Amino acid sequence: MSTCLLIALILFAIGLVFAAVIGGWTHAIRQTEASGERGGNEAVPFISVIVPARDEEAGIAGILQDLYAQDHPRDRMEVIVVDDQSTDRTSTIVQEMIARWPRLRLLPNNGAGKKAAITTAVEAAKGELIVLTDADVRCGPRRLASIAEHWQMKQSALIVLPVWTTGSGILGGLQVDEQAALLGMAIGTSGSGSPALAYGANLAFTKAAFVAANGYEGDRSSSGDDVFLLQRIKHNGGTVTGHFDPDAAVIAQAMNGLGPMIQQRLRWAGKMHGVRGGSNLLGSMALLYPWGLLITSITCAPRIGDHALFTTSLLFAAWCMWIVPVLMLVRSVRTRFGQPASLMGTLVSMIAFTGYAPVIAMVSPFLRPLWKGRRVRTRGPHELFREI
């Protein structure tokens, strides 16, 4: 057996695993669409919505207006904004809204950073169910009702919730497709019983589960408030579910400009080092697999040998098993949000992602990107395999 044929067989086998896993995520997403789940007759849970905010004067009023307009019973919810040492009018805007909304509270951060802000709010929260919300997103009026219905049915310790990204132009379209694929992974892994990804912009968990998992105690990284909490609650025996309902989603704007987009992905890559187990291995394989296919296709093409047809067929099938499942995953996610995907556009986005994602993953442990005047501390190389 020639070396090229052996490598082609290995890549084909990896492709089968990759296609099966991604196909499982897509199936899980379609199952949530067909389930039409609704809560039982239990009492409506009291929900504490936590909004960590630092220099968010441009967006804080919008998300608070959305939360004020929720269908969830007004006497069964509260909104806690934690001001994380803002230098703009964020606190002033919130205080002006408190005068007309008694269920809105403003707290100073007891520490510095988003994790400290979340901890501050959880300690003061009255609700049994906590819902995290970024200050720069928007949401629909049925968001909390949808989350409450899911929790009444599942009684989850933590619920992975959807974040939908909107953007225009080439760069915006790239981010929409990229985030649709990641959302598919988040909901798919949750639905298949192996949750690996969550969004701090939209995340629900019980106060009891947060306390039982010791919150963020001992976690010195300033990023990863979502993924690390998911890992802790899961490790502590808490049930994690995904709720893929567009009503429960928040809407985030794509980054405007290549520089901000790269900075954002450096922060995200830093927190992904907290993902342990098979999902982390699969993620690494997904980043490197197309490069292996490309290198093998280029180096083996001139000297395929006697098994030319078989080797070529294996490589072609391996390429298809990389491309097609991801295209179908993105299509399923976008269709669920009423945003039909262009297969060609998604293919271009995926190829671009394949180019820059491995680079960002490799350099992220060594860089500390700037975020709102602060250097983000991610896990360094010596901490990547340390238990949370």
Image: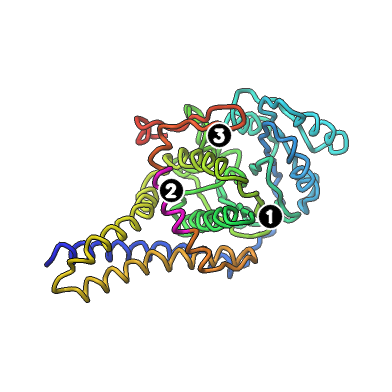
**Residue holding disc 1:** 42
Specify the amino acid type for callout 1.
Glu
Tell me the number on the disc at residue 357: 2
Residue 354 located within the stretch drawn in magenta = yes
Residue 315 image offset from top left, x and y in percent: 28, 68
Specify the amino acid type for callout 2.
Ala
Residue 159 image offset from top left, x and y in percent: 57, 50
Camera-side residue of 277 and 370: 370
* Cβ atoms under marks 3 and 1 closer than 8 Å: no
Residue 62 located within the stretch drawn in magenta = no
Position of 77 compared to 166: left or right? right
Residue 382 versus residue 42 in the image, above or below: above
Q: The C terminus is located in which quarter?
A: top left
Instruction: Estimate the spatial distance between the alpha carbons at disc 3 and disc 1, rounded to whole Å.
Output: 24 Å
The quarter of the picture where residue 40 lies is bottom right
Decide which of tag 2 and tag 1 comes sooner along the chain. 1
* Cβ atoms under marks 2 and 1 closer than 8 Å: no
User: Which residue lies most toward the bottom here?
Assistant: 309
- Camera-near label (2 vs 1) is 2
Residue 318 image offset from top left, x and y in percent: 32, 67
Decide which of tag 2 and tag 3 comes sooner along the chain. 3
The residue under the point 57% across, 67% down is 341
Camera-side residue of 214 and 91: 91
Local crowd size for mark 3, using a 10 Å CA cut-off: few (<14), some (14–19), many (≥20): some
